[in-house]
Amino acid sequence: MIDLNGVEPFAEGGNRKCFINPNNPNQCLKVLHPGLLEKINKDRPWYKKGRSLESFDDNLREKEGYEQRALKSKNPDIWKHLAKWYGLQETSLGLASVTELIQNNGQIAKTLEDYLFDKGLTEEIRTALMEFEIWLKENLVLTKNLIPHNLVLKNEANGVRIKIIDGLGCHAFIPLPQNTKFFAKIYVEKRIELMWKRINWDLSGRKGDWK
């Protein structure tokens, strides 16, 4: 068990807190907020009552996302734009999903969201996003909506590389993209379209509904 007592999270979302693994500074530990699943169970609407409580667990959903068909490829390029996953581990705060901690010179990589708010859509980032698009289309990696705060910027010798740190999995109600390349291609192209809508929404000052 990993002891997280006294360890402060470096980031926090609606469902999980993120910690640097005290036993390995190159790993991120994602832990659910205390009591989250119980709260979800209490507050969920009637049409979600038939779902198991585990289906709302982001750590288990992340595990499922990393087990998708595309990531079983032997091609090392499959990890070019994706944080590696090291499984689930028990901590003093509950079960954690353990992923690669993306860093630049020992500092946690900046999210695309922070970069856009700070500098806007520069040519360097536009190029990085186009390379990211190509990778998604070539490898058909299934993601939920590609939100800028779930993408980070890794500095490389030849420029910036976009890395997914959260949001893997299939958002489709009927899981056809998980089973056929035809539907996976359609699904991935839709995620890319929505990614650009979200980026433009962020840049516009978040006016109206981004979808």
Image (cartoon, grey):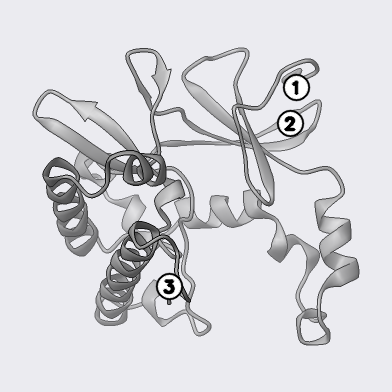
Is residue 96 placed above or below 50 in the rendered structure?
A: above
- Residue pictured at 67% horizontal, 44% vertical: 16
To which quarter of the image does residue 11 belong?
A: top right
The amino acid type of the residue labelled 1 equals Met
Binning the other alpha carbons within 10 Å of mark 3 as few (below 14), some (14 to 19) or many (20 upward) gives: some
> Along the polypeptide, which appears first: circle 1 or circle 2?
1
- Which label number is shown at residue 22? none
1 vs 3, front mark: 3
Q: CA distance from mark 1 to mark 2?
A: 5 Å
- Residue pictured at 17% horizontal, 45% vertical: 122
Q: Is residue 110 left or right of residue 1?
A: left
The amino acid type of the residue labelled 2 equals Glu
Is residue 137 placed above or below 33 in the rendered structure?
A: below
Q: CA distance from mark 2 to mark 3?
A: 37 Å
Percent position of residue 90, x then y: 73, 31
> Along the polypeptide, which appears first: circle 1 or circle 3?
1
Residue that carries the numbered disc 2 in the rendered image = 90
Q: In this figure, what is the number of numbered marks?
A: 3
Residue that carries the numbered disc 3 in the rendered image = 210
Percent position of residue 199, x then y: 33, 60
Query: What kind of element bears circle 2?
Result: strand
Is residue 110 placed above or below 204 in the rendered structure?
A: above
**In the image as oriented, which residue stretches furthest toward the left?**
158
To which quarter of the image does residue 91 belong?
A: top right
Residue that carries the numbered disc 1 in the rendered image = 1
Q: Is residue 156 left or right of residue 150?
A: left
- Residue pictured at 46% horizontal, 56% vertical: 168
Q: Of residues 131 and 114, which is closer to you in this image?
A: 114
The amino acid type of the residue labelled 3 equals Trp
Q: Is residue 167 left or right of residue 58?
A: left
Pointer 1 with pointer 2, Cβ within 8 A: yes
Query: What kind of element bears circle 3?
Result: loop
